[in-house]
Image: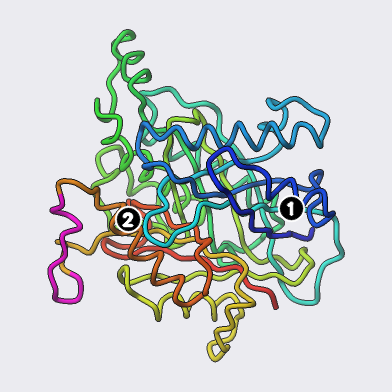
Amino acid sequence: MQVGVYKVKMGNPGDVSDLERQIEAGDINPADIVALIGKTEGNGGANDFTRGFATQSFSLLLSKYLAISPEAVLRRVAFVWSGGTEGVLSPHATVFTRSDSPPSTTKRLAIGIAVTRDLAPEEVGTMLEVREVAAAVRRALIDAGIDDAHDVHYVQVKGPLLTPAAVQDAERRGVALVTQDPNGSKPYARGATALGVAVALGEVDEADLDDSVIARRMDLCSLVANTSAGGEVRNCEILLFGNSAKAGGNLRIGHGTLRDVIDTAGICDAVRNAFDDEDAVIDPQRIRAVFAKAEAPVGGMLRGCRTTMLSDADINYERHARAALGAVIASVTGNSQIFVSGGTEHQCKPGEAPVAVVVSV
């Protein structure tokens, strides 16, 4: 296996011209594309339709090159979008390819992909979702050719949140939901999928979990999960990244923990973890992609100083946090095409957040 990582610029959520240009130039083989992770300029909430628009646009383009229907593209390629490009964050997509290659002499970047079945509204944010995701993560480990969970550095999960239509459906059938609030369902949805990752990788014992701890017992967490929830999906898509002895190429991945949204040192530690060298020089030219979660400081206090992230009635805290962290990461990488997603339920300890970095070696 050899994984390729390519950045694609987007002028709007329906703009696929840069991917088309790179395909036409021969830089990307469309037959090798297996996944796409991107940021759109929507609000990131339950009514963020830019994510579905982007998926539709890219699937239409790829259907032309692959000579299959857009629906078949969706079964072949995993699309994960996060809305919200506040501050310096640039709308973009990271395209992943996978092709045959002899293994390298040392472990290299590998990707494994798996999906769950479609979830009913009453299953979102519950232990049923935790178990479905855990099973899918185990399948993704096999798909990636990774034998040791310690070689996993980033697990991106996109799952459903509760849309108004889903809430109405549950009401008609007389079933209980974790909440009646579509936007309020995001913590449960993101939390359940993160705990699924934690269970599969041995970070949390399933015996310590039940429905009552989801989005509440934040000390139960994964250090490598990065989860999002949207109304454009019904199942959970799992993209697992790690380093495998069965992979070739010149890319590696590492991860770290951000102590807060201005933790530059944590970003640099993640880069060095990818190089497997504590003394590695931070060369922006060798950083191929960054994937991070952003969180408001506990109680709104950042290193002893008050912020308005949690008290601003006009701007949601996720948007504050994404903007702040995006600027900090860009100051290290020199590139604003960064995947920063808000909300860290069960993704690192409270106030902290995961970050993963792909580098060329």
Q: Residue at x 30, y 16 (%)?
A: 175
What amino acid type should be assigned to the residue bearing mark 1?
Thr
Label 2's element?
loop
Expressed as whole percent of the image width and height from the top left, the position of residue 289 reads 58, 65
**Can you identify the residue that label 2 sits on?**
220
Q: In the orientation shown, which residue stands out farthest toward the front?
A: 11
Q: Residue at x 40, y 55 (%)?
A: 204
Display colour scheme: rainbow
Label 1's element?
strand
Q: Main secondary structure of the magenta part?
A: loop
* 130 part of magenta stretch: no
88 on left or right of 286: left
What amino acid type should be assigned to the residue bearing mark 2?
Leu
Closer to us: 27 or 165: 27
**Can you identify the residue that label 1 sits on?**
97
Closer to us: 108 or 311: 311
Closer to us: 49 or 4: 49
What whole-number distance in Å separates the C-alpha atoms at marks 2 and 1?
33 Å
Q: Residue at x 15, y 68 (%)?
A: 301
333 on left or right of 349: right
Point out the stretch of residues depicted in magenta. Answer: 302-312
